[in-house]
Image: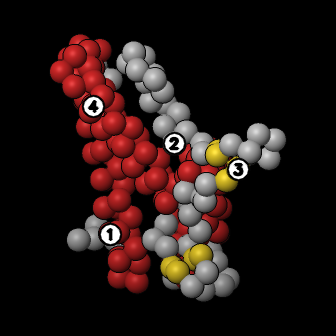
Amino acid sequence: MCGVGIPNAITPTWDALREQVVRLHLQWRLHEELFVKEERRKLLDEVAGTFFGLVQQNFLLDVQLAIARLGDPAQQGSNSNITLHKLAAEIRALYQEPLDPPVQEFFAALARALAAFALASEKVRERRNKYFCPLRLRPCHGEPSRPNPYPYARRDRGRPS
């Protein structure tokens, strides 16, 4: 369902993005509820530390993937992505030249917001791209090289990382 004032032409993209962002927010809140509170984290470690360590890693990976997807290009090859860039392009397509000054300012602010998001999520996208690329050999050592997709996961569980 679309909010008041959202043009019909962008409703499908708006609704899909809204659903993604709401899901991302709920996942992060659940992650905080489970793993940020010290007493709860200690209890989870005592009860089933390895299991909840994997659950935490999967939460973090899913959050990172969702953030990376939001900042992807609107189009990749023949695939159309539901991203912030697609929404911006659809909004832009609603307006004809010449643009009124308030509309010009809106698009300038939108471009600044997209650039700020890209900058803030750059490391997350890099991790996503490296993690999901083929397994490669390190040039100097001939060893498999796969980046850690969970750079923020706790390593103090007393088990090998």
Q: Which residue is mark 1?
A: 15
Q: Which quadrant holds residue 43?
A: top left
Residue underneath mark 2: 149
- Residue 107 image label: none
Question: How far is the residue under mark 2 from the one under mark 4?
Answer: 17 Å
Is 85 placed left or right of 61 in the picture?
A: right
Amino acid at pointer 2: Pro
Dot 1 or dot 3: first in sequence order is 1
> Sequence-wise, which precedes: disc 2 or disc 4?
4
- Whether pointer 2 and pointer 4 mark residues with C-beta atoms closer than 8 Å, the reply is no
Q: Residue at x 61, y 54 (%)?
A: 135
CB of mark 2 within 8 Å of CB of mark 3? no
Dot 3 corresponds to which residue?
137
Q: Mark 1 vs mark 2: which is more N-terminal? A: 1
Of circles 1 and 2, the one toward us is 2
Q: Nearer the viewer, residue 34 or 14?
A: 34
Q: Which residue is mark 4?
A: 52
Tag 1's secondary structure?
helix
Disc 1 to disc 3, C-alpha distance: 42 Å
**Which label's residue is closer to the chain start, 2 or 3?**
3
Q: Earlier in the sequence, mark 3 or mark 4?
A: 4
Relative side of 18 to 123, left or right = left
Question: Does the CB distance between marks 1 and 2 fall below 8 Å?
Answer: no
Task: Where is residue 80? Give x, y as percent.
Answer: 51, 79
- The part of the image, by quadrant, that contains residue 73 is bottom right
Neighbours of disc 4 within 10 Å: few (<14), some (14-19), many (20+): some
Seen from the viewer's position, the closer of residues 94 and 147 is 147
Residue furthest out toward the front: 142
**As displayed, is residue 13 above or below residue 39?**
below
